[in-house]
Amino acid sequence: MKDKFQKTIYACFTGYVVQAIINNFIPLLFLTFQKNYQIPLREITMLVTINFGIQLLVDLLSAYFVDRIGYRISIVSAHIFSAAGLLGLVILPEIMPSAFQGLLIAVIIYAIGGGLIEVLVSPIMESCPTKQKEKAMSLLHSFYCWGHVVVVLVSTLFFRIFGIENWKILAVVWAVVPMINALVFVKAPLASLIGEEESGMKPGELFRSKIFWLLMVMMVAAGASEQAVSQWASTFAEQGLGVSKTFGDIMGPMAFALLMGSARAFYGKYGDRIHLDQFMMGSSILCILSYLGISLCPSPVLSLISCGICGLSVGIMWPGSFSKAAASLRTGGTAMFALLALGGDLGCSGGPTLVGMVSGVFQDNLKLGILAAIIFPVLLLICLVCSSFFYWSNQP
């Protein structure tokens, strides 16, 4: 049975690579857009906010429509939107009244795809007949990180060899990935997430659950803790620390993604020997320390090292929160995964936006912006403590 679903599992892995392309390619071009299109930093921030904001809206709506139209149509459509948006980055800025309008429309298109992928890939993977679901979920989410690494490494090498002015060619190359994976999902077998005699929880039922709201706050904090640094790492390294773009991209966002993926792969391999809550608490504390290192260390080298450590610390936060939800609310179904993805994307939008807004107030000082975002790993740590208390208080 497992061999039958191997194609589905690989397609899910690739789905998160597509998600990594969507979320991490355009931040490498922030300064290029600023220089070539004369787009100010506040509008650059808007691209990040709109990307995750649209994904958030899709997360919310998909809780109501995915079960009606089916997983296959939804996941294939997600990849088509993703490819169309990436191609739109190439075409739309040239034909719209302003380049920013073109970029914004392209971002909206691929954000629809990204939102659907975020909602669908985890439950599709959860439905596959695999043992030790927590380990499988962590391994799945590690592919977002490997995709992030590939995006940064390939893009950096491309810019170095062919020049960043040829970025549109690379955007077309990245668009091929979701096109191919859409074809794979057309034929891949899909299993049911809920047993035949069970029905998934409705949004109203979830809203009445205290543990669901705790998990929602955890997802918000997890997404914000991750993306507040990830989305600004390239700009922070180049502009805030004064290093070259090539060195900054490799030591900033790529090191962040590599260590984040390593943390997820580590738990994917050894998760049966590690208590998830304890691992997440330790990661939250390490994340708080890394934020302090990024924002307060006077040395650029130590700040960059702190960026990498931040990636290591946030690795388990998102998949760990999903795993806790799947274990706590076993009949949560599509609605639960969709609403949790909404919470995560709310954090993914709010984290970088807070950094950008605070930085703008202090003359584009990204260190102060990142320092303000330390509230998110602190909030996650508080939720984990509350979660453990809730668990023990309900033991006989």
Image: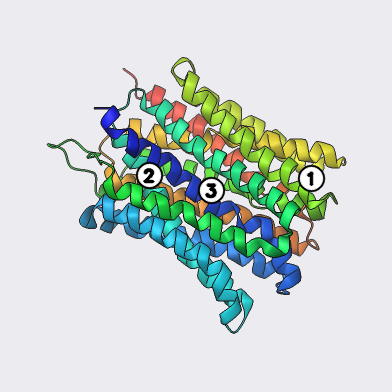
Q: Secondary structure at mark 1?
A: helix
User: Which comes before the other along the chain, label 1 or label 3?
Assistant: 3
Instruction: Check disc 3: other Cα within 10 Å, few if <14, some if 14-19, many if 20+.
Output: many
Give the amino acid type for the residue marked by disc 2 in the picture. Answer: Val
Q: Position of residue 282 (x, y in %)?
A: 60, 26
The reply to whether the C-beta atoms of the residues labelled 3 and 2 are less than 8 Å apart is no
Q: Position of residue 307 (x, y in %)?
A: 71, 40
The residue carrying mark 1 is: 247
Which image quarter: residue 226?
A: top right
Instruction: Check disc 2: other Cα within 10 Å, few if <14, some if 14-19, many if 20+.
Output: many
User: Which comes before the other along the chain, label 3 or label 2?
Assistant: 3
User: Which comes before the other along the chain, label 2 or label 1?
Assistant: 2
Query: Is residue 256 toward the left or the right of residue 272 in the image?
Result: right
Q: Secondary structure at mark 2?
A: helix
Q: Residue at x 52, y 62 (%)?
A: 86
Q: Residue at x 79, y 61 (%)?
A: 362
Instruction: Check disc 1: other Cα within 10 Å, few if <14, some if 14-19, many if 20+.
Output: few
Q: Residue furthest left?
A: 197
Q: Split into 4 quadrants, where in the image is the N terminus?
A: top left
Q: Which label is found at residue 121?
A: 2
The residue carrying mark 3 is: 20
Give the amino acid type for the residue marked by disc 1 in the picture. Answer: Phe
In the displayed structure, 328 sits above or below 351; it is above
Q: Residue furthest front?
A: 162
